[in-house]
Image: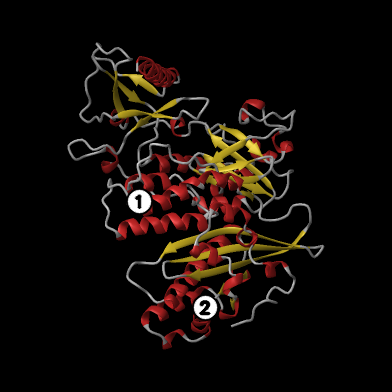
Amino acid sequence: MGDKAGFHVRKWVSNLTEVLADVPEEGCVSEVDLENNELPVTKTLGVSWTAREDQFLFHYLPPPEDFEYTKRNVLRKTATLFDPLGFLSPFVIRAKLFMQQAWLDALAWDEVLPSEQKEEWTSWFGELSLLEEVKIPRCLKDTSTKEASIALHTFSDASERAYTAAVYSRHEYQDGSITTRLITSKTCLARLKTLSIQRLELLGALIGLRLANQVCSALAIPSNSVTYWVDSLNVGYWIQGKSREYKPFVAHHVGEIHENSNPDQWRYVLTSLNPADLGTRGMTALGLTESTKWWNGPDFLSTSTENSESSTS
Amino acid sequence: MASQLKIAMSYYEEVAVAYQQVLNDYLDKKYIRRVPDDEPTPECQWLLPHFPVIRSEKATSKAWIMFDGSAPIEGKSLNMEALSGPKLQSDIFDILVKFRKEWVALIGNISQMYHQLVLLPDDRPMHRFLWRNMQINKEQEVYEFLRFLFGGCYCQFCAQFPWQKHAEIHQGTYPLAAVAVKNHCYMDDLMLSLNSVEKTPVDRDG
């Protein structure tokens, strides 16, 4: 069809060699060698994907030896981390917080950072190469067994400095097995004008709501298949209550939550089990690669009685 | 020092060769034309600044040429005067999330998408540039694009519209390809996932 329109589509790649079997060789990415069953790593929309392992990967180099630690340079280097789905949020939030500190200290763009900040940056950049160990399955579900149902679980959290939301898929299969995977996450820095933690928790819940709804529309699943988990009793109380009784800030945001979800969808989770907590506190690259809590959510999602470890607020 | 200079020189020579190759290729494919010296200058014309973007990590095409539609001259640029048109494509976020949905993954790329689109004759003089074919002593020559190019703010819309229009026209014959173009395409990249292999070959000719 494309050729009829004068557009020639090439560089075809798939995770299954049989899909490419009837694509003429010159239409495939040059490294695809169908006979040897080799599939390449490709970069599309800035995201690296290995066709054979069917995984997303990251590959970043630390800055060169003679790198000058100025606000301009660290920002430029940080901006090369392209992570549109927020897989690396717990790692990236640290850089965002360092950057905010540089602004608070009112440093000029080309001023060399004070040694304390420089050290923080050096260790953060030093960890970049460890991100190669991050391997994220491309497909949200396990393909070997027949799926029965999909549900989404969204977690949110806040600290004085940042708030985070993370959305997980939970597939239940016909044989009773369950898989859970991180779909996407988002972290925002708290604005410098101080808001109470409770209000930041509410903002966290709100970005969770928006993110989950965006995922629902992309995956074409109903918005009532999302369960929202918060670790703030106060936010739970606000959402269960009637928004008219609150101050404008709370009423306004709770209003948006009520418009787009049902209070029954909101539940309480212990902070220690909340994966969004990792996104607000920050993690080392090594910690991130090993964190099943971040990549798959808390263990209780994988048990069939999904709220055994928590209670409805 | 001398050897470093040599390395630098040969490096720039490589870029220069690649630059000239791209332009020769454009001439061969009739994407651009040399404007004859005796051709009367139209009432309205625009000379685009250009510079190389070097991609040392790429095995093919060491350098590509960026024509800067946003560069202002005397307070005006091509992109300030042109209208960008509505956004037709889906978000990167949506495309990536959809790409994770089903177990068969397929990606593809449209070859030189913008250069497949012919500029209207009236618009061509707005896409001119100077080049002297690597001969420093020579007077600069004027070249003109006959096709769309990367760098104009309107190109995204002008490319997406016919691409989606064709998908629509042919959706009876290629229903899956039509869906792929409409919902799984970001600029010149296609990225989709499907729930069975049998369905994929339909897209192949698309």
Q: Dot 1, how many residues are within 10 Å of its Cα: few (below 14), some (14-19), or many (20+)?
A: few
* Image quadrant occupied by the C terminus of chain B: top right
Q: Is residue A162 above or below residue A144?
A: below
Task: Name the residue beneath numbered marker 1.
Answer: A115
Q: Residue at x 53, y 25 (%)?
A: B59
- Mark 2 secondary-structure assignment: loop
The chain identifier of the residue carrying mark 1 reads A
Q: Is residue B157 left or right of residue A284?
A: left
For the residues tagged 2 and 1, is the chain the same? Answer: yes
- When asked about the image quadrant of residue B52, the answer is top left
Q: Amino acid at mark 1?
A: Ser
Percent position of residue A241, x then y: 50, 86
* Image quadrant occupied by the N terminus of chain B: top left
- When asked about the image quadrant of residue A64, the answer is top left
Task: Name the residue beneath numbered marker 2.
Answer: A232
Q: Is residue A276 left or right of residue B33?
A: right
